[in-house]
Amino acid sequence: MQSSTAPSSDTAVVPSQEPDTGHPATADGASGDPRVGWSSAEDAPAPALRQRRDGILPTVAAALSVRGATLTSTAARGEHAPALHPLVQDFLDTLTSAQRDRFTGRCAETILISRHLTAADEERSKRARRKPMTNGEARKTLKHAKLTTRRIREDGDPLHGGFARPCRACAALTAHFGVHVVDPATDTTD
């Protein structure tokens, strides 16, 4: 008669764990995670893009720095334009057709200024919020603000990472609110 040594109900068999990842280890000590070892630093670079993709690229990314706080955004895509702060929307609505582009209001610069003004509007006291923010108050919240914009392109595109000048509407918007547009490569302010 053979005796079996099955674990009792009060003891559990726990497979050994890898100390670094917490993934179960196999008997020979290799990882049980099939993704481990799929890539390494020695792998070949990504294949060249042979066909254009209809995705988010190319686009523009921007960063707005105001008194040590930095907001980042990319240009908006989609069927509907983003909801903008009323002061920003009012300013864009007053632009002439010579100052507008078909994508006016979707630029990263416009979205960032709008987000900053919305946050500043929400930080106002209840009493101050009874009245809408004025252009003067908006300029005060954007005092010493700096904005930079970069092109985001596919791998291998020579324009990737380069400074992108604001469009006509954004140039007028940044001038209206006193935001300095900066090209970090040349370290100059427009």
Image (spheres, rainbow, N blue to C red):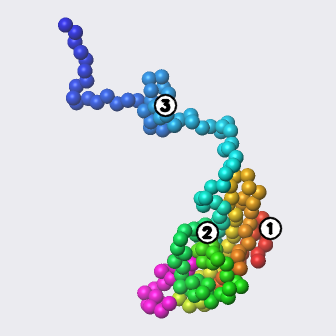
What is the CA distance from the residue labelled 1 to the residue labelled 3?
49 Å
Q: Residue at x 74, y 66 (%)?
A: 163
Dot 3 falls on a residue whose secondary structure is loop
What is the CA distance from the residue labelled 2 to the residue labelled 1?
23 Å
Dot 1 falls on a residue whose secondary structure is loop
Q: Residue at x 76, y 77 (%)?
A: 190
Residue linked to disc 3: 31
Identify the magenta region.
114-132
Snapshot quadrant of residue 14? top left
From the top left corner, tell me how far across and down residue 50 is, in percent.
Answer: 69, 49
Q: Residue at x 62, y 81 (%)?
A: 142
**Label 3 or label 2, whichever comes before in sequence order:** 3
Q: Circle 3: is it few (<14), some (14-19), or many (20+) Cα within 10 Å?
A: some
Q: Disc 3 marks which amino acid?
A: Ser
Task: Using the image, tell me which numbered label, if any, was put on residue 50.
Answer: none
19, above or below 109, in the image? above
One can see residue 110 in this view: no
CB under 8 Å between callouts 1 and 3?
Answer: no
| Closest to the observer, 64 or 85 | 85
Total labels drawn:
3
Q: Is residue 127 magenta?
A: yes
What is the CA distance from the residue labelled 3 to the residue labelled 2?
42 Å
CB under 8 Å between callouts 2 and 1?
Answer: no
Q: Is residue 46 magenta?
A: no
Predominant SS of the magenta segment: helix
**Label 2 or label 1, whichever comes before in sequence order:** 2
Residue linked to disc 2: 75
**Label 1 or label 3, whichever comes before in sequence order:** 3
| Outermost residue, left side | 1
| Closest to the observer, 121 or 158 | 158
